[in-house]
Structures are given as structure tokens and as C-alpha cells.
Amino acid sequence: MTPATPLRYSAALSIAEEREFVPFLQELVACAFDVIRPLFLAGIHVQDKADASPVTAADRGAEAALRERILARYPGHGILGEEFGVQEGGRYRWILDPVDGTKAFVSNCFLFGTLIALERDDGCGYRPILGCIAHAAAGVSLIGRGTRTTLHLADGTERETRVRAPRPLAQATVLMTSLPSSGEQGSGESMARIAGRAKLARTWGDCFGYFSLATGGADVMLDPVLSYWDIAALVPVIEGAGGSITGWNGGDPLAEPSAIATTGAALHAELLAAKS
């Protein structure tokens, strides 16, 4: 029996919203890149936040610039950002993670990125209608609309992108952010079990893992613990590329910030069974 298709967690984007917000989202990506690029590989100072996670001038400077740009264009919109918290607004809300993968950034690793989502509240709470994964070091980005995802290259060209053809876990490439044995994200036994059954397992994680999945480079990305600003942008990107994304226990990843992202329903069902 074919597994049921997982529920979709992004909301529909109207034609008018696409015309209005996608060009502005591209402006925000360029804004973030302008702040982050001069600071990468520059040996900038690293501070530890209360939760012991690192933060730099790139994180704070990029989010401050993004907030300024958003409020100048849409003063009635809300904002939720990793560095500067909540600004209440109306029907639309922007979710900002200016440097996702700060540990990679401060280690001179190119896999860090910027996550931006736009959510809409239709009366039942906010749901993402647009999501973006943008990699300043490579000058590339993905924009997901829930029904399609486009890859934007450094030379200005763009094309639609899809997840790779489904395959079983034994033939799959599995990505994760941390080593299962590190205890950094918990669920180490589950991740080790999945990695042990995969053809290839690598820690090419943070937002790059989802970029790889959405562009056909991998089959699975695992994140048992996330924050809301980590997950909101990923949902439209993965769903738009034809993949499946749920929380760690198979439910709403926005309500339970965590992720199992795969190429589709059959592999997703196998992953959920394998981690138990």
C-alpha cells in the first residue's frame, strides 16, 4: 500500500502576493548579502549568547538591516527574528534568521545561510506563504512558494528545482547538522540508526541540508531540535520542490519546531519507522 501523502504546512500564495512580495524578498536577500559578505573570513569577534550559541556582528547587523528595510516598506507587518525578537503586526509577519549556521560561519565554513519567511494569518494563526534559503558565500538562493521552488544563481539566472526521484533509505544520502554522538540536538540514537541504514550520511547541515535536498543533491535532512525562525522558511522551500517535511514525530513542524525532510511520502514513512 502506498503511504499517504503528508499534510502540507505552507499556505497558498496568491498571484497578487507573488507579484508583490517575491521581488521584495529578493531585495532582502541582497541586503543580507551586503552585510554578511564583508564579514565572512574576516576574523570577526564571536560572543556567546545565554544558551551558549555564538553570535557575531554578521547576525545582528544583517537582521537589523532586514528589519529596517521591511518596516520602511511595510510598517504594518510583524517581524519575528532570532536576534531582536518580536515586533507585533497585522496579517503578514516576516521571520528572520540572519545567519543560520553561525558555528559554520565562525569556522570559515561556506555552508551557513540566511533564512527569511513571510507568513500570513487567515484567522487561524500564521502560516508561511514564502520561504527563502540564501547562501551569501556562494551567491545563490532558493525561493519556495509551497507549490514551486526556484533556484536563483549568482549570474542572475533562475530555474525551477525539484527533489530527486524517490529511493529507499538503503540507497539514500542522509544529511544532519551534528554528529549523532555529540548530544547537541538530542535523539542521537535515532539519528545514528537512520545514518547506519543509509547509503551515505554526512553532517552537511544547518540550512544547507535543506538546500541540498530541494535541489536534488540529497534525500533526507534531519533536525530533531529547531527554533521557529529555523523552520518557517524551510517549509515552503521543501514543499515547493516536491518534498515532504514534518516535525520529528511526524506532525506539524511549525508547532513542534524540528524537522524530518525527505523526497516524498514513501521515504518519509520509512524514516519515521526507522527512528523509532
Image (cartoon, rainbow, N blue to C red):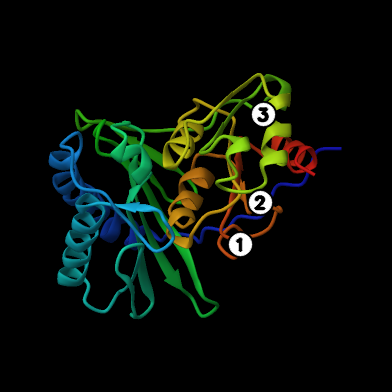
Q: Any mark on residue 248, and which?
A: 2
User: Mark 3 vs mark 2: which is more N-terminal?
Assistant: 3
Could you tell me if residue 265 is visible in this image? no
Mark identifier at residue 256: 1
The amino acid at mark 3 is Ala
Image quadrant in which you'd find residue 97: bottom left
Instruction: Tell me what residue is drawn at x 58 percent, y 53 percent.
Output: 258
Whole-percent x and y of residue 74? 22, 72
The answer to whether the residues at label 2 and label 1 have Cβ atoms under 8 Å apart is yes
Left or right side of 102 for 243? right
Task: Give the labeled residue for mark 3.
Answer: 195
Tell whether 169 sits left or right of 180.
right
Q: Residue at x 22, y 54 (%)?
A: 28
- Counting residues from the N terminus, which is met first, the one under dot 3 or under dot 1? 3
User: Closest to the observer: 102 or 146?
Assistant: 102
Numbered disc 1: secondary structure: loop
**CA separation in Å, label 3 and label 2:** 15 Å
User: Which residue type does callout 2 highlight?
Assistant: Trp
Q: Amino acid at mark 1?
A: Glu
From the image, state whether disc 3 or disc 1 is nearer to you. 3
Q: Residue at x 53, y 38 (%)?
A: 178
Local SS, label 3? helix
* Residues packed near mark 1 inside 10 Å, few (<14), some (14 to 19) or many (20 plus): some
Q: Position of residue 264 (x, y in %)?
A: 65, 38
